[in-house]
Image: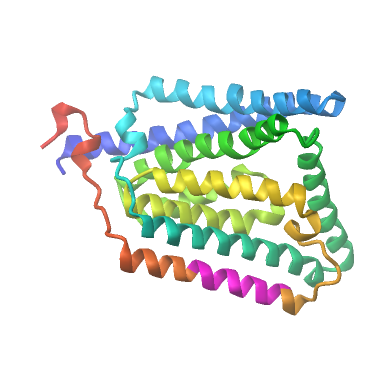
Amino acid sequence: MNKDQTMFLRTRASQALSLTIGVLVIFFVFGASLEMLNQYLDSPLYRITVAGLSQVLFMLLPLLWFLRRYGFSRREIVRERHTPKPIAWAYGLMGVVGIQAVNVGWNGAMPKLLPLEWAESWNELIALYDSSLTSLVPDDSFLMIALVLLVLGIIPAVVEEFLFRGVLQSSLERVGNPAKAIVITSVFFALAHAYLPSIPALFLMGLWLGYLAYHTQAMHLPLFLHALNNILAVLTMFYVGAEVTGGVNQEATLTQYALFMLMGIAMLAAGVWGVQKHVRQRNIDINAYLPKELQN
C-alpha cells in the first residue's frame, strides 16, 4: 500500500473507534434513561415498546448518523458479501452452543468459589437481570412472543453486528493484525452489555463471531448466529427458567459445573478446528474498501 492508502485506512480505523464509543455513550446515557420508565409502566406491551424504542432511537439511529457523517460505504460494513458454505454454519453453531455451556458453567461455579457474601450478591445480580427480562413477557400470544423476540433477539443482533463486526473490527483489520482487531472488538462487545456475570462468555462470543466474520469475510454467519443465540437465550429463560440459564441452581455441584464448562470449551475448540480445516479462508481485498481515486 502507498502512503495515501495507508493514511485513508488509518483514518477509517480512528473514525470507526470514535463512532463505536459515541454510539455506546449515547445508548447508555439516553437509552438507560428511557428504560427507567419501565418501572412505572404496568403494561408489558408498553415496557417492550420502550425497550424497542430505546434500541432504535439511541443505538440504531446514532449509528446510521455517524456512518453518514463519516461517509462509510455499504461495502465497508457488509464486507464482501460472500455466502458461507453450509459446513461453516454447522461449525459456527457448534461454537455458539459451546459458549452457552461455558456461560452456564461459569455462572454456576462462581457462587461456589466466592466468599458467601459475594456469592449471594452474584446470585442476586443474576436473579435481578432475569426478572427484568421475564417481566417483558405479557402472555403466551404469538404476537407478543414475536415482539419480545424481535426486541430482545433480532434488533440487538443486527445493530450490534453492524457496529462491532461490520464497522469497528473490519476497519481495524485493514490497518494491522486481524487477531488484535478481533480481540479489541470483543472487549468492546463484552463491556457494552454491562452484565458482569456473563462478561467471560460475552468476550468468547465476540471472539467467535469476529473470527467467523474475518475468516469468511461476510456478515451472514455472525449476524445469523448472534440473532439465533439471543432468541434461544430468551426462549430458554422464559420456558426453562433462570435456575438453568443463570446457573443459580444450588443443588448442582462445582464438579458438575466444571464439567459443563469443559464440555463447552471442547465444542468451541471443535468449531474452531472445523472452520480451519473445512472453510476456505477469504483474504481481505483492500481495494474493495478504498475510494476509486486510491485504488491500485
Left or right of 181 in this view: 233: right
Most frequent secondary structure within the magenta stretch? helix
Tell me if residue 142 can be seen. yes
Residue 41 among magenta residues: no
Depth check: 234 or 19 in front?
234
Q: 70 above or below 86?
A: above
Q: 17 above or below 67?
A: below
Give the residue displayed 60% in from the left and 31% down from the top.
25
User: Split into 4 quadrants, where in the image is the C terminus?
Assistant: top left
Give the residue displayed 32% in from the left and 27% down from the top.
73
Q: Position of residue 176 (x, y in %)?
A: 31, 51
Residue 258 among magenta residues: yes
Give the residue displayed 50% in from the left and 62% down from the top.
94
Q: Position of residue 207 (x, y in %)?
A: 48, 56
Q: 84 above or below 103?
A: above
Q: Position of residue 232 (x, y in %)?
A: 63, 50
Tell me if residue 195 can be seen. no
Which residues fall within the magenta stretch? 257-268
User: Split into 4 quadrants, where in the image is the N terminus?
Assistant: top left
Left or right of 24 in this view: 130: right
Query: Residue pushed farthest left?
Result: 296
